[in-house]
Amino acid sequence: MATAETFENLKNLQEILVQKYDLEKKVSDAPKQLSNQEELLSKTRKEFIEQKNAYDLISDKVSRLKVELDEAVRSREEGEKGVANSTTHREYEALEKQISEAKDKEDDVRRELQKEEKELLALDERLKITEESINFSEQELRTSRESIDNEIAGYNERLSQLREEEDKITPNLKQETLFKFQRIIQRNSEGIVAVRNGVCTGCHMILPANFANEVREAENNGDKDILFCPYCSRILYYEEVSEDQQEDYFDIGVAGSLAGFDEDFDDEDETEDDDERDGGLGEYDSSDSDDDDSDSADSDEESEEDIEEDEE
C-alpha cells in the first residue's frame, strides 16, 4: 500500500483514538466523582452510630437514676409515716436517720438525673440533625449516581461509534505499526507529525539530514517503511514549507547579529596586527635616527680636518 494512503489512514485514526482514549478515561474516572460524597456519607453514618451509642448509654443511666430516685422517695415517705407511729425514742431516732439519708439520696439522684436528662435531650437533637444529614446525603448521592450513569451511557454510546470507525481503518495497517501508534497516542495524544525544514514538529528537534531525506523519499516513493522520530518516537511524514513558514524556523535577524559579531571580532584582530606593525616600525625609526645622528657627527669631523689641511 502506498505510504501516502497509510499516512492518511493514520491521521484519521489519530482523531478517533484521541477521542476514544479521552472517553475511556472519563468512563473510568466518572465513579471517582462520587468518592467524596460516599466518604462524607460514610463519615456521617459513623458519627450517627457513635451518637446513638452514647444516647443509649445515657438513656440506660437515666432509667437507673429514676429507679434510684423512686426508691429514695419511697424510703423517705416510709420514714415519715413511721415517725408518726413511733413509740420509743430509739425507734424515732432510727426513722429520722432513715428520712435524712433518703432525702440526701433523693437530692443527689435528682440533680444527677436532671444533668443526664439534659445531656440526653441534647444528644437526641444531634441525632435528629445527623439523621437528616444522612437522608440528604443519600438522596444527593442517588441523584449524582443517576447523572453519572447517564453520562457513562452517553460515553459508551459514542465509544461504540468510534470503535466501529476504528475497525474500518485498522485492517489497512500493519499490526506492528498499529501497536506502536496506539502506544504513542496514549502518551502524547499525537502520533503522526510532519517534518518541516528538517525539524520534527512533534518534539521540535532537528533531525539528521540523511534521516530527514529518508522521510522525504518515503513520502515521494511510497514503497518504504514508515519512519519514527528518533527523539519522540512519533511517526513522521514530510511536508513542504513555504517561504513565509521558513521564517518561523530561521530568524535572519539572529543570523545577522552573529555575522556582525564575527566582523567586529575580525576588526579587533586587524587593529591588533596594525598596532604590532606600528610598534615595530617605531623601534626601527628610532634606531635609524640614532644612526643618522652618528653619521652626521662623523661628517662634521671630516670637514674640520679638511679645512685644517687647506690652511697649512
Image: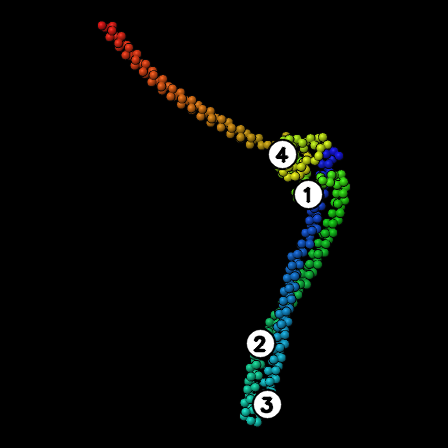
Label 2 SS: helix
Spatial CA distance of label 4 from label 2 is 88 Å
Q: Quadrant of residue 114?
A: bottom right
Residue 188 in sight: yes
Nearer the camera: disc 4 or disc 2: 4
Spatial CA distance of label 2 from label 3 is 28 Å
Q: What amino acid is at disc 2?
A: Glu
Q: Which residue is mark 2?
A: 112
Q: Which residue is mark 4?
A: 207
Question: Which residue is pictured at 61% across the width and 84% down the height?
Answer: 74
* In the foreground, 87 or 311: 311
Image quadrant occupied by the N terminus:
top right
Q: What amino acid is at disc 1?
A: Arg
x then y, percent, for residue 25: 69, 49
Q: Which residue is mark 1?
A: 183
Spatial CA distance of label 3 from label 4 is 115 Å
Which mark is first along the chain, 3 or 2?
3
* In the foreground, 94 or 116: 94
Which mark is first along the chain, 1 or 4?
1
Which mark is first along the chain, 4 or 3?
3
Q: Which mark is residue 168?
A: none
* In the foreground, 144 or 49: 49
Nearer the camera: disc 3 or disc 4: 4
Q: Which residue is mark 3?
A: 82
Which mark is first along the chain, 1 or 2?
2
x then y, percent, for residue 125: 63, 69
Which mark is first along the chain, 3 or 1?
3
